[in-house]
Image (tube, rainbow, N blue to C red):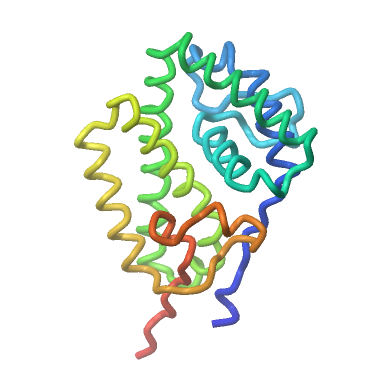
Amino acid sequence: MSEQRRIFAVDLAQDVRVVAAMAEHLTPYIYEGELYGMLSDPSLPRLTIGGMLMRLARLNALRDQLSPTQQASVEAAERKFDEVRRTWAVHYEGKLQQELRARLTALEQFAKDCAENPRACADNYPSAMEKRVMLEHLRDAALEINALSEELKSRLMVLDNAISRCVEKGDFCWSANVQPAYPPQKFWFLYAVTRKPRTK
């Protein structure tokens, strides 16, 4: 079991910096064709709608862990995000669809690799689940604007079945500071460890 207890660390102060930087670059990103937008600071992750949604949801859920200055920064980023969503509604929907497909494809491959090589899967599982968390927020956002196709719903269901075959229940696999933002009923895949390879 110990070899599977790899933890994916989440730094909320970094989250605050990331959402502020992402908010600044939402236009022209929202109406351009690229899925991964550039930020001025190359040390920060690339801009995507899923990355923004995930961090805003986490920071709002864990607001009491932030300083007043950080809270104000998150609120400003959220206002900007809401404004861009309203102003560029068609492009926003297009970006949601584009990222849903890309994240699904990446995780479908991950689940396939897990089935073939459980040991490698154990090493990468906690960090790979960041994509699945983004998918959850992207799915919710698409449902909110009635933009989740039956095809995407079906692919997500098949993906979750594939992931569940590779894991069993376990402790929260991200850093404990963010656990309150992720109820196990909705984010079951964060409360899991990969199954040990069967020995013959």
Q: Is residue 165 above or below residue 152?
A: below
Instruction: Report which quarter residue 52 is drawn in.
Output: top right
| Residue furthest top in the image | 87
Q: How many marks?
A: 0
Of 79 and 68, nearer the camera is 68
Q: Position of residue 186 (x, y in %)?
A: 40, 54
Instruction: Report which quarter residue 141 is drawn in.
Output: top left
Looking at the figure, which quarter contains the N terminus? bottom right
Looking at the figure, which quarter contains the C terminus? bottom left
Q: Position of residue 56 (x, y in %)?
A: 58, 36
Q: Residue at x 33, y 24 (%)?
A: 145
Please give left or right for residue 4 compared with residue 106 in the image.
right
Q: Residue at x 54, y 66 (%)?
A: 172
Instruction: Report which quarter residue 55 is drawn in.
Output: top right
Q: Is residue 33 above or below residue 150?
A: above
Of 23 and 2, nearer the camera is 23
Q: Position of residue 144 (x, y in %)?
A: 34, 29
Q: Residue at x 26, y 50 (%)?
A: 157
Q: Is residue 48 above or below residue 89?
A: below
Of 114 and 16, nearer the camera is 16
Q: Is residue 133 above or below residue 138?
A: below
Please give left or right for residue 21 compared with residue 79 in the image.
right
Q: Position of residue 34 (x, y in %)?
A: 51, 21
Please give left or right for residue 20 compared with residue 104 in the image.
right
| Residue furthest bottom in the image | 200
Please give left or right for residue 19 compared with residue 102 in the image.
right
Of 127 and 174, nearer the camera is 174
